[in-house]
Image (cartoon, rainbow, N blue to C red):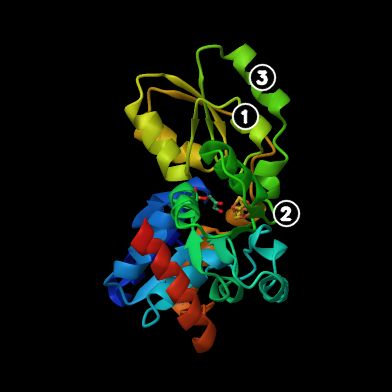
Amino acid sequence: MNYIEEIKRLKKEKNACILAHYYQEPEIQDIADYLGDSLKLAQIAMTTSADIIVFCGVHFMAETAKILNPKKKVLLPVLHAGCKMADMISPKEIVEYKKAHPKTKIITYVNSTASVKALSDCICTSTNALKIINHYLENGDEILYCPDQNLGKYAMKEGNVEFEVWKGCCPIHHFLDPKKIIEMKQKHPKAVVLAHPECKLDVLDLADYIGSTKQLLEYTRNQAADEFIVCTEKGVIHAMEKASPHKKFYLASDTLSCMSMKYTTLKDVYECLSKENNEITVEEEIAVKAKIALDKMLELS
Ligand code: 13P
Ligand code: SF4
């Protein structure tokens, strides 16, 4: 079967749209109507006129789309495509933290479950984390930033401020060894180093530019440099190469591959669109509370 043609036909027939994160496999990125980072995809999910959203990414992303646009049918081609970082904090832990620190504002990274979002004051993504954290600090609030310790530590360093951070992380970014970047820089001395803020500070200290996947992609498009060392998940290199075919991109380490993001195949997309299965649902009470925290992020972004 020609999955690409069948997917195109079904999209038209069912008024569906395909959203894909930059960490998806190249063939999935290529059939997407919209490609983006977690903020961009959430914004598209909120405004699309399609009746069905096929979300090629991980579970929390599809869940976020459903919360922001509850009337739409949101499908996740591979239901077990989860995010290890999102599993590093539970609603029970937040409830306990809030009991012990009733005045603290909970700022939660979008890589989290709907139940955790529902207990938060505001959500953020890698694009707007610094802005949102600063907004609360400037307001004189005490904050807990969860669950990504690395983005939290980066925000503390950038703003020269202190606040509580949870001990979660993205294992893909967290275990990137700075020695790999030093080796890469020796091999490619003219290359500009790009890093995602989910990397540890010792990696970020070696970076020329730090940003979300979309910001990194835009940077490669707009800079005069011809070579880049990429310190984030390898999928984004496909989008970078498409945007700047004459430039060279070197993945900092072979370990920068997120298994969950790679599960989705064209067959999965075709099957879930044709059967309209793998639908994402969120309990009403949780969805309403999580939406308040997501709306707060959109308001502050
Ligand atoms: P962004 O999409 O915000 O760059 O974050 C990457 C990520 O963690 C996706 O899982
Ligand atoms: Fe989660 Fe990391 Fe995979 Fe992103 S790359 S989905 S943060 S495990």
Q: Residue at x 35, y 35 (%)?
A: 243
Label 3 crowd bin: few (<14), some (14–19), many (20+), radius 10 Å: some
Task: Name the element at disc 1.
Answer: loop
Q: Residue at x 39, y 52 (%)?
A: 35
Q: Is residue 214 left or right of residue 180?
A: left
Mark drawn on residue 156:
none
Residue type marked 2: Lys
Cβ–Cβ under 8 Å for marks 1 and 3: no
Q: Quadrant of residue 116?
A: bottom right
- The image shows residue 277 at horizontal and vertical percentages of 51, 79
Under circle 3, the secondary element is: helix
Q: Residue placed at 63% from the left, 63% from the top?
A: 82
Q: Quadrant of residue 52?
A: bottom left
Nearer-N-terminus badge (1/3): 3
Give the image location of residue 161, x and y in percent: 57, 43
Q: Secondary structure at mark 2?
A: loop
Q: CA distance from mark 3 to mark 2?
A: 26 Å
Relative to 181, residue 122 above or below: below
Q: Which residue is mark 3?
A: 182
Q: How much space separates mark 2 and mark 1, taking CA atoms?
A: 24 Å
Q: Residue furthest front?
A: 140
For the C terminus, which image quadrant? Answer: bottom left
